[in-house]
Image: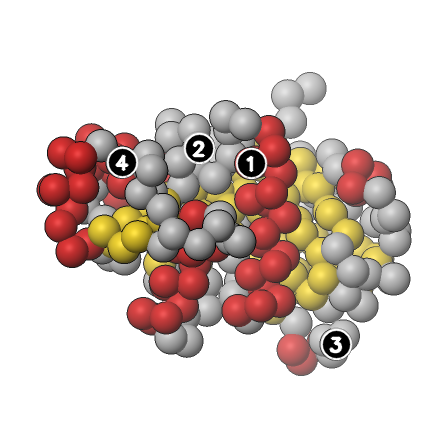
Amino acid sequence: MEKDDEAMSHYPLLSTDSRFPAVILADGDYPTHSVPLSVLSSSSYLICCDGAGAKAISHGLSPIAVVGDGDALPISVRDKLGDRLHIVTEQKFNDLTKATRYVMEQLGGVSSIAYIAATGKREDHTLANISLMAYYERTFGLSPVMITDYGYFAVARGRNSFGTFPGQQVSIFNISCKRISGEGFRWQPYTYTMFWEGTLNEATGNIVTIDADGVYMVYRTFDKKNV
C-alpha cells in the first residue's frame, strides 16, 4: 500500500548514539566499526545466533538468549549459558530467522531490530541474510536494520525520507516496486529492474526522499566517498 505524505516515515542517520529495542548478533564477521560496536555494547536485549554466543561472551557481552541448532557452540559455552540456550532443530529457517522469531515471541510488538555480524564469511549466507530483511518487514511488520562495518541496510515501503550527508553513498534495491522516484540524489532514481541498477548513488544534502509504490531496501554508507 502506498503511503501518503502524512504517513511518510523518517529513517535517521545511524551513529554511536543509536539505540534499538533488540539486537541480534549473527555469526558472520564480528564488527570493528564504532557504530555497530556501540549498538552492541549498549543493547539491553541482545540475542545471539548459535555460534555468535561464544563470540559475544569472549567480547564481554551477556546475551539474553542464544538461539539456533547448537551445532557451533562448544560444550563449555553451552554450560555457561545454561537455560539461556534455546535449541531449535528444524532446518527450514536459518538461525537468523530463528532468533528473530524468538524476539518477536518474547517482546511482542517490538517495531525494530538491529542485525549485526550478518555479513562476511560465506557469500551465500551474506546474500540470504540481506534478503531476509525484506522478509522480516513483510512477515513480522518490522523495520529491520542490518549494520555492517561499512554502512547499513533499512527496509521501507511507500514514500519515506532518509537522513544523509553530502557525498554519502546511497544504494536503492527494488523489492516489489513498479514505480520509484526520489529527491536529493546526484542521479535521479527510477524503477530499477536489476539490483545493481540502484547502487552507488550519492546524496547531495542532509536528506533524500524516495517515493515508491512497494517495498525497497536502502543502503547508506558511514563514510563519504573518497574522491
Label 1 crowd (10 A; few <14 / some 14-19 / many >=20): some
Q: Given this view, does label 1 or label 3 mark the residue nearer the observer?
A: 1
Q: Earlier in the sequence, mark 3 or mark 2?
A: 3
Q: Which residue is mark 2?
A: 28
Q: Which residue is mark 1?
A: 125
Image spot of residue 119 (x, y percent): 51, 34
Q: Quadrant of residue 86?
A: bottom left
For residue 164, say whether it is visible: no
Image spot of residue 115 (x, y percent): 45, 48
Q: Is residue 1 above or below residue 92?
A: below
Q: Earlier in the sequence, mark 1 or mark 2?
A: 2
Q: Which residue is mark 4?
A: 73
Give the Cα distance between marks 1 and 3.
Answer: 30 Å
Which label sits on residue 13?
none
For residue 169, say whether it is visible: yes
Is 1 positioned to the left or the right of 180 in the image? left
Residue lying at the far front in this picture: please name it: 90
